[in-house]
Image (cartoon, rainbow, N blue to C red):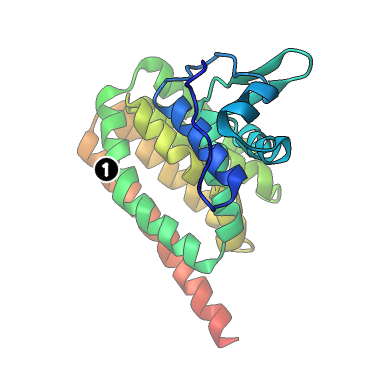
Amino acid sequence: MANLFSPIKDSQTLSQKIERKIEQAIRDKTLPTGSKLPTEHELCKMFAVSRTALREALRRLSARGLVDIKKGSGMYVSDYNIKDAISSLLLYYDLKFDKNLILHINQARLMFEPEIAKLAAINRSQENLDDIRKSIDDLIKCDPDHIQAEADLINLFHAKITESCGNSFVSISMEPIFSLIPRMRNFIYANVEGEHESRIDFHEKIYHAIKEKDGDSAHAAMKEMIEHTNETYINKLQKYNTE
């Protein structure tokens, strides 16, 4: 542990340099998950910095989910999980949420989701199929005036299809995008008459293609639905711009 860190000599912000050095030690497994960091006193000596600069670096590492500070016990390398990574992306999307982001997300969905639906049709299990079916049944029963509940069920439908494709990396990558569906739905479809029924029809079409393990039909149905979403959004933007 004595040679774990070297003194900070750069004129750059000390706390940032400390943060980067500790982060790198975590990244390269010099400090593996669950390991205990040296004490504050020891770290100050290693870095040759003040306690104030060290504490600021540790505070940021803790906020990012890399370090867990336990009172009376010490500081430990956190078990960084996917929720931590997704949380950072969600914050970014929340801060950047605007008309352009919605358009970009729709474009990204058009690139990825038809292929995801195709994979789901090929790889889905009966349990996957039952989960997709339930999300549709719940959407059918949902009062369209309950916008948030409806949006959450739409999100669930897409998430269950992604789970069915059998690729955990795809599920992880798409989760932040799906988390925006409720906000996008409120923005795009608020007060669009007949959209609830139209959405159910699209979901049923996709479901039946997946049920029959027809990858090409699942791809086409998902593509059709997302193109419809994008067209509705563009029409709404044009309407706003002319009012």
Depicted 12 relative to depicted 48: above or below: below
Q: Which residue is mark 1?
A: 219
Residue most extreme to the right: 72
- Pinpoint residue 12: horizontal percent, then vertical percent: 54, 52
- Count of residue discs: 1
Residue extending furthest toward the left: 216
- In the picture, the quarter occupied by the C terminus is bottom right
User: Does residue 193 appear anywhere in the picture?
Assistant: no
Which x, y percent locates residue 103? 44, 63
Instruction: Tell me residue 127's x, y (percent).
Output: 42, 16
| Residue nearer the viewer, 229 or 138 | 229
Which residue appears at 31% of the width and 30% of the height? 120
> Foreground: 110 or 11?
11
State left or right for residue 193 relative to residue 104. Answer: right
The residue positioned 36% from the left and 39% from the top of the image is: 206
Examine the image and state in which quarter residue 117 appears.
top left
Q: Residue at x 54, y 20 (%)?
A: 79
Nearest to the observer: residue 216 or residue 173: 173
